[in-house]
Image (cartoon, coloured by chain):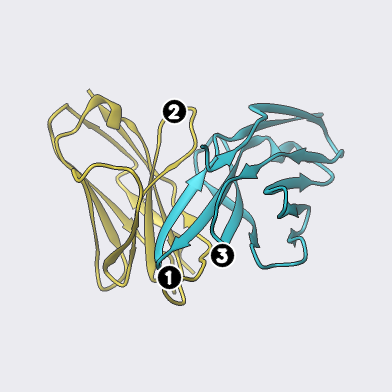
Amino acid sequence: AQKITQTQPGMFVQEKEAVTLDCTYDTSDQSYGLFWYKQPSSGEMIFLIYQGSYDEQNATEGRYSLNFQKARKSANLVISASQLGDSAMYFCAMREVAHNFNKFYFGSGTKLNVKP
Amino acid sequence: ETGVTQSPTHLIKTRGQQVTLRCSSQSGHNTVSWYQQALGQGPQFIFQYYREEENGRGNFPPRFSGLQFPNYSSELNVNALELDDSALYLCASSFLAGPGLIDTQYFGPGTRLTVL
């Protein structure tokens, strides 16, 4: 089974509107971390937001928030007030720690296009 | 504060050759992870080094090997290059407070490897 599933290969959003990028994950670990990264066409991976599996409140970082639904194993990224500069690939990722040995998994990404 | 740097930015090799990629971690970080990102796909975790020892590994064959130095910089070595090794190789650094804990990774700009 896929560890991270992003079902939206591409999304369009109008500038200044909010958009939700979907992410579901699969793990049997109790302790894990969920991340979202942005990758512009330049190729560099930019950290956006982090949610720990034990965090009860949804993470927020400026215009980014993570809608964490543990029972459903989903960790959707919400971008409010979209800007043209938000056009990029967005990757959901998960960190597992089993026996102090780390594994990191990325999804296949969602390409977001912000329209003026 | 200096971010994560990688060298070289681009590299062309032929099948069967060996390659070494280099990464300098961000100031204050003690952990380095390496990823392979094929065109149009999400990054695939190769391995992580913490305190100069391998601390996690993905599904890559032994011809992918690494090193971490006392200053926390790192090398990725790939032997017997194959055409499918052509990809963007990303290095990420983080501060890991201890084994079994979660770290947030910050990525470098990547090295584009082409194998002919």
Are discs 1 and 3 less than 8 Å apart at CB? no
Picture coordinates of residue B76, whole percent (x, y): 26, 50
The residue to which callout 2 is attached is B39
Q: Secondary structure at mark 2?
A: loop
Picture coordinates of residue B38, whole percent (x, y): 41, 31
The type of residue carrying mark 1 is His
The type of residue carrying mark 2 is Leu
Q: Which chain is yellow?
A: B
Q: Are marks 1 and 2 on the same chain?
A: yes
| Residue at 69 percent of width and 49 percent of height | A75
Which of the 4 image quadrants contains residue B74? bottom left
Q: Answer with left or right where residue B43 lies relative to residue B20.
A: right
| Residue at 68 percent of width and 35 percent of height | A87
Instruction: Check the image and report above or below for A34 versus A78.
Output: below
1 vs 3, front mark:
3
Marks 1/3: CA–CA distance? 22 Å
Q: Label 2 is found on which chain of the structure?
A: B
Estimate how packed mark 3 is, as few (under 14), some (14 to 19) or many (20 or more) residues with alpha carbons within 10 Å: some
Which of the 4 image quadrants contains residue A22? top right
Q: Label 1 is found on which chain of the structure?
A: B
The residue to which callout 3 is attached is A31
Q: Quadrant of the C terminus of chain B?
A: top left
Q: Secondary structure at mark 1?
A: loop
Q: Are marks 3 and 2 on the same chain?
A: no
Towards the viewer: B57 or A111: B57
The residue to which callout 1 is attached is B29
